Image: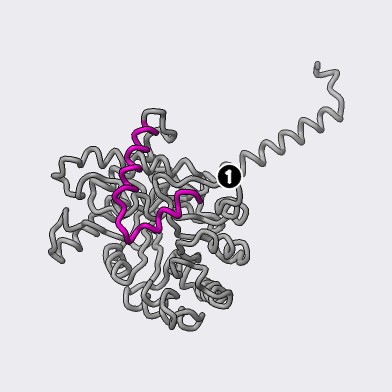
Amino acid sequence: MTRKQLTRRDFMKDVAAAGVAAGVAAKAAGAADEKTRTRSYNAEMEYRRLGKTGLWVSAVCLGGHWKRINQVIGSDKAAFDRNRHEVISRCLEVGINYVDACMGGEVMAYAKALRGRREKMYLGYSWADKEPRQAEWRTRAKLMESLDAGLKAAGLEYVDVWRITMHERGGRHSDAEAEEMVAALAQARKQGKARAGGFSSHDRRWIKKIIEKHPEVELVCTPYTASSKELPDDSLFEAVRKCDVGIFGIKPFASNSLFKGDGSPESPHAAEDDRRARLALRYILCNPAVTAPIPGLISIHQVDNAAGAVKERRELDAAEKAELRQATDEMWAKLPESYEWLRDWQNV
């Protein structure tokens, strides 16, 4: 069509199309700006939106547990404090910007490690022994009492995420107890004590029920291992997407059952275990409904290895899939009896 043949209708179509394109571009630019404004942004790290919280967190985050840390530092308390400080420091350097503390000891340790740089990392908080796993802590008032006491003990003014630790089998909670939990999250947000709120549970059917019933829930901590798969029908992740809920995947390595070695740097299996960890993280990140896996990392080396997984090609090729399948077969074969419940998370 020549310039002379261009009609007013054609011109308006072009203007409208340009406007839509500009709007899409502006929206994309806005999302990019949000990512780069996140805490401890690193261009080599991937960031994902944590559901309707609006927070952008690193594709791999730091879990609060430090299992087998004695293999790295021994049992010295001063060495432990240095280790947690150094691990946090390395996380900040590579762009890992969320730490999930779910026990009183973890809250105290990470609050200490973050002292003087609190605004550089998002802090997820739970004080599990004073939350609804214990019958006396199942009302809004008692949960707020627990939060206030925990903040004071740790010297914190607020937390970025309060993810209340519910009973592993969430269905054991009554509807009234769930409503008390949601009410506590709302009060904490209103009072500025938590920027975002959710809960942890090992019961996928109950999680689905709660997030569909209570839009106030913004995120969930729940298991997702190196062999978990999304169910083709009635999956938890259908509800996660529909309700725009962020998901932190706990137990990505099935309580270290994925590994051959003992976690020590001198282990003859150290290099193979590093590779297994990266394969597992890459596999989990292939499910975009999982915001981030949150492995416990006990050394600077493990932080670098986890960050390295994000930089590698995402999809596993045929040989890598076979390698991970063999590793997870071994993982299930030696799973401790106390973690047999993880088998329920092979299909989610």
Query: Is residue 252 shown in magenta?
Result: no
Vertical arrangement, residue 187 with respect to residue 48, above or below: below
Residue at left offset 51%, top offset 59%: 204
Residue 222's x, y, as percent?
A: 45, 58
- Residue type at mark 1 is Pro
Instruction: Classify residue 54 as left or right of residue 265.
Output: right
177 over 275 or under it: above or below: below
Judging by the rendered image, the residue that carries numbered circle 1 is 232
Residue 197: x %, y % from top left: 50, 66
- In front here: 151 or 35? 151
Residue name at image x 29 percent, y 42 percent:
305
**Stretch in magenta:** 320-348
Q: Quadrant of the N terminus?
A: top right
Using the image, determine if residue 260 lies above or below residue 197: above
Considering every residue shown, the one lying at the far top of the view is 2
> Which quarter of the figure has residue 99?
bottom left
The residue under the point 45% across, 47% down is 228
